[in-house]
Image (cartoon, helix red, strand yellow):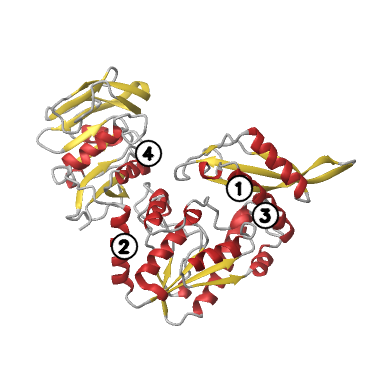
């Protein structure tokens, strides 16, 4: 039985980070909205309450039944969770005289507390809250304090319920990993057995049991997620997996041929489909980003469905959905959980009549890469930058034409090749060129030009949820700009995007 930790999400910006830290300690965990909690089973070893943008004093603040968890499971309540338990157990929470945000140092730590084992009294922690616990009930023991926060942590006496006012999941809390490990191992009794090797073994066994002799079709994109999903399925069902790689005319330069060749060397049962003209004809004249996405999604489904029908008696659609695709689409503001349409197929229409199998839907991106490494997938595939499902269509602002695609493919190839040659590709989370819907005056030789502008984008990130622009060396940027302008006809200006996410997004559309 796979032991797990349940994280109740009250809407905190750090909830995914809590999950990542738990996973890094080789303990499996799941995030569930506070208002859509599944029935807990014997495999649940403990509960973590997240923070929240709400104040516990607000009328519309998230509410849960504490008795459903306290006394039944070990509980670690973080920030809002700590305030919620205190207030609803008879304590008091008041607005802080000043917002407590940023680094702080513990001044008192209970040496007998299991939660603070091997954590010093001067340990640095990260605060992020506007309310303070001013009083705790008599059966609460304060187990940590800072100079300005008397109740930095407490334990409910006679129970394994712990609460902290700071965030152990952020790197600024220097002993945050130790605290989480204390909770998971010493308090919850987790065995830390959830590893990439264990995931591969259990997932292949589960897929064999789930699929039997059924046939599965899967749309490959050339990216990390679909590739790892394909190899897992292939190891489980062999040639009953039918992979389809569609050339929508919006891939990187020469990508269709290169990726198809890579996949064949991996032993996958794969069919390539050239559908460039079909996609470009449906995109003609469309300028609105959402209309472009919908057109691409619709045509992909039509092309994919045609190919799937050539496989007799197929019952399943395989997808490379990963955990952020699932949890980002679950609202903590309402009781219903709506999963967003998957970018690679634009949603699954009823007429396809296929059941869906998603072997990676519990993994974060970095975990997918580690599983891929365990499976022996080539680093060239595992290290590929994320690429949008609609491809270059959303890196061409405005309408999409074959001429614009060709220009962007050439510029993008020069950009990516230079990053590789400079040893920078693997230091960048994602990079790409954007074709802007503006023209500018230039001088080339003795002639004035009025041609197109290319924007270069490169960001650093862990999982794409937040990102900072990369400070690429000026000589590298200069070389890229010169090559694009000199070699790509129709471009006379190159600019570099220095926006971070938020407030900007990684892609422009």
Helix, strand or loop status at disc 3: helix
- The x, y position of residue 337, in whole percent, is 37, 55
Q: Nearer the viewer, mark 4 or mark 3?
A: 3
Going by the image, does 85 lie left or right of 296? left
Are discs 2 and 4 less than 8 Å apart at CB? no
Label 4 Cα crowd, 10 Å radius (few <14 / some 14-19 / many 20+): some
Residue that numbered label 1 is attached to: 432
Are discs 2 and 1 less than 8 Å apart at CB? no
Q: Is residue 222 above or below residue 30?
A: below
Q: Is residue 256 above or below residue 130?
A: below
Residue that numbered label 3 is attached to: 409
Label 2 Cα crowd, 10 Å radius (few <14 / some 14-19 / many 20+): some
Q: Is residue 224 visible?
A: yes
- The x, y position of residue 129, in whole percent, is 35, 29
Is 481 in front, or is 18?
A: 481
Q: Residue furthest top?
A: 147
Is 203 in front, or is 378?
A: 378
Helix, strand or loop status at disc 1: strand
Residue depicted at x 79% and y 46%: 451
Q: Residue furthest bottom?
A: 312
Which is nearer the N-term, disc 4 or disc 3?
Answer: 4
């Amino acid at each position: 039985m796979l032991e797990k930790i349940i994280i109740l999400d009250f809407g905190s910006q750090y909830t995914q980070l809590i999950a990542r830290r738990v996973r890094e300690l080789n303990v499996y965990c799941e995030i569930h909205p506070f208002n859509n909690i599944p029935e807990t089973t014997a495999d649940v070893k403990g509960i973590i309450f997240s923070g929240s943008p709400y104040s516990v004093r607000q009328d519309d603040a998230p509410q849960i039944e504490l008795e459903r968890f306290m006394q039944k499971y070990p509980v670690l309540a973080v920030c809002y969770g700590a305030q919620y338990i205190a207030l609803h157990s008879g304590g008091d929470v008041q607005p802080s005289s000043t917002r407590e945000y940023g680094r702080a140092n513990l001044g008192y730590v209970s040496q007998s507390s299991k939660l603070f084992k091997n954590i010093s009294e001067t340990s640095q922690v990260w605060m992020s809250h506007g309310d303070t616990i001013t009083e705790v009930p008599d059966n609460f023991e304060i187990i940590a304090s800072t100079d300005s926060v008397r109740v930095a942590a407490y334990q409910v006496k006679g129970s394994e319920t712990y609460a902290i006012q700071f965030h152990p999941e952020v790197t600024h809390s220097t002993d945050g990993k130790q605290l989480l490990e204390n909770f998971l191992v010493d308090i919850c009794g987790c065995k830390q057995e959830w590893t990439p090797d264990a995931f591969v073994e259990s997932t292949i066994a589960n897929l064999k049991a789930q699929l039997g002799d059924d046939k599965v079709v899967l749309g490959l994109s050339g990216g990390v997620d679909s590739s790892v999903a394909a190899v897992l399925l292939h190891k489980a069902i062999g040639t009953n997996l039918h992979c389809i790689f569609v050339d929508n005319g919006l891939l990187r330069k020469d990508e269709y041929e290169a990726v198809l060749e890579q996949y064949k060397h991996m032993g996958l049962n794969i069919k390539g489909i050239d559908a460039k003209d079909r996609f470009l004809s449906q995109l003609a004249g469309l300028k609105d980003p959402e209309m472009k996405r919908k057109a691409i999604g619709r045509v992909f489904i039509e092309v994919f469905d045609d190919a799937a029908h050539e496989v007799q008696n197929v019952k399943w659609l395989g997808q490379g959905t990963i955990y952020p695709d699932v949890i980002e689409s679950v609202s903590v503001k309402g009781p219903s959980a709506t999963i967003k349409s998957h970018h690679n197929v634009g949603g699954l229409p009823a007429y396809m009549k296929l059941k869906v199998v998603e072997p990676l839907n519990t993994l974060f991106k970095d975990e997918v890469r580690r599983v891929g490494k365990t499976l022996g997938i080539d680093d060239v595939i595992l290290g590929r930058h994320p690429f949008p499902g609609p491809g270059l269509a959303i890196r061409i602002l405005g309408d999409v034409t074959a001429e614009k695609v060709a220009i962007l493919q050439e510029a993008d190839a020069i950009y990516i090749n230079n990053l590789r040659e400079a040893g920078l590709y693997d230091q960048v989370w994602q990079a790409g060129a954007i074709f802007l819907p503006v023209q500018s005056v230039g001088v080339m030789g003795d002639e004035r030009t009025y041609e197109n502008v290319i924007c270069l984008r490169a960001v650093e990130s862990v999982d794409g949820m937040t990102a900072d622009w990369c400070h690429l060396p000026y000589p590298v940027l200069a070389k890229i700009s010169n090559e694009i302008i000199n070699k790509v006809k129709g471009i006379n200006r190159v600019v570099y995007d220095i926006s971070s996410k938020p407030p900007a997004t990684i892609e422009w559309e």
